[in-house]
Amino acid sequence: MKKDLLSINDLSKNDVEKIFEMTDKLRNKHTSHLKGKNIALIFQKPSTRTKISFEVAINQLGGNAISLNWNELQLGRGETVEDTARVLERYVDSIVARVFSHDDLVKMAKISKVPVINALSDLEHPCQALADLYTIKQKKRKLTGSKIVFLGDGANNTFHSLILACEKFDMDIVVSCPKNYKPEIRANYKIIENPEEAVKSADILYTDTWVSMGQESEKENRIRDLQNYQLNSKLVKSAKKDVIVMHPLPAHRNSEITSDVMDGKHSVVLDQAENRLHTEKAILCLLIK
Ligand code: CP
């Protein structure tokens, strides 16, 4: 495995399989893999799942998590990410960071001798994608050949990572979005603008917020542009009978997903959230030597 996990493209298919094997081994276990290790968790944006699942994962592995908001650190007063990384590597065994600019993670990883883990950037959310792919494998028992359909904002950081992860397993990837909301990554996916057409024979339907953190000023336009891509019961009925519905959360109920679908029998959103914890334990064990 590479030193850092900034993008799903930092992992080979074999690395992903290793993470899933380790996830199965560590599920619901408390171990001492990280005994004596300290991990800094830095958040430039709010978080519920990522912050808490990483803290619990580190705790269950016998390590010590130090969680800090960007503005509690001198980063908030202009200390550079490079200088911060130079100092942190003298104290901690890994840095997990949620940032606005992906470039800040790249700068940290370049400077730091300890692993840097992307806890979400404007470009990618690899830890979410690994939990999502693990959830698909858990529910569907196979990845290769399964059809996943993303609805909404195709340029979303979570979609980017999940598209790259699904591509490694030769899944059939369809993105249903308006013309100016296409993914901003190179990968092997199809665009089908019409959502009713896109969801036909889907095994997995996936959506995420239409207004990501930092896009609040564009809220009205984005909601107007994306309203026809809402994941609702009509679309679920057009997919396969045993389709699973996924959302990384937090959800805006009755905006990108209707409440009945989010709470309905096809939804696996809470298993997805739980799997953040299990997969992050494996990521930490494999990256921190
Ligand atoms: N899905 C996800 O990353 O959730 P949080 O923003 O709550 O961490």
Image: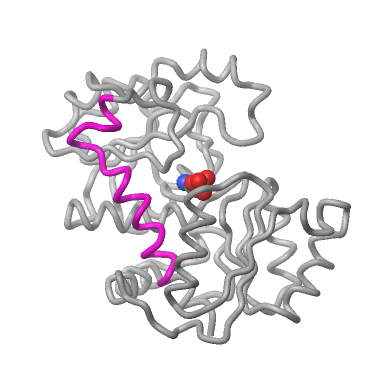
Seen at 27% across and 20% down, the residue is: 196
Q: Is residue 109 above or below residue 232?
A: below
**Foreground pick, 257 / 224:** 257
Q: How many marks?
A: 0
Q: Is residue 269 part of the magenta span, yes or no?
A: yes
Q: Report whether 244 appears left or right of 7.
A: left
Image position, residue 266 (x, y; %): 20, 36
Residue 277, quarter of picture: bottom left
Seen at 72% across and 65% down, the residue is: 108
Image position, residue 283 (x, y; %): 45, 70
Q: Is residue 159 above or below residue 81?
A: above
Q: Report whether 78 appears left or right of 222.
A: right
Magenta-drawn stretch, dominant element (helix, strand or loop) = helix
Residue 169, quarter of picture: bottom left
Residue 228 seen by the camera: yes
Seen at 60% across and 64% down, the residue is: 96
Q: Report whether 122 appears left or right of 268.
A: right
**Foreground pick, 246 / 164:** 246
**Foreground pick, 257 / 181:** 257
Q: Is residue 271 above or below residue 39?
A: above
Residue extent of the magenta highlight: 260-282
Residue at the limit of the structure toward the right, as seen here: 78
Residue 186 seen by the camera: no
Q: Is residue 262 part of the magenta span, yes or no?
A: yes
Seen at 70% across and 54% down, the residue is: 69
Q: Report whether 179 appears left or right of 87.
A: left
**Foreground pick, 265 / 192:** 265
Q: Is residue 48 above or below residue 73?
A: above
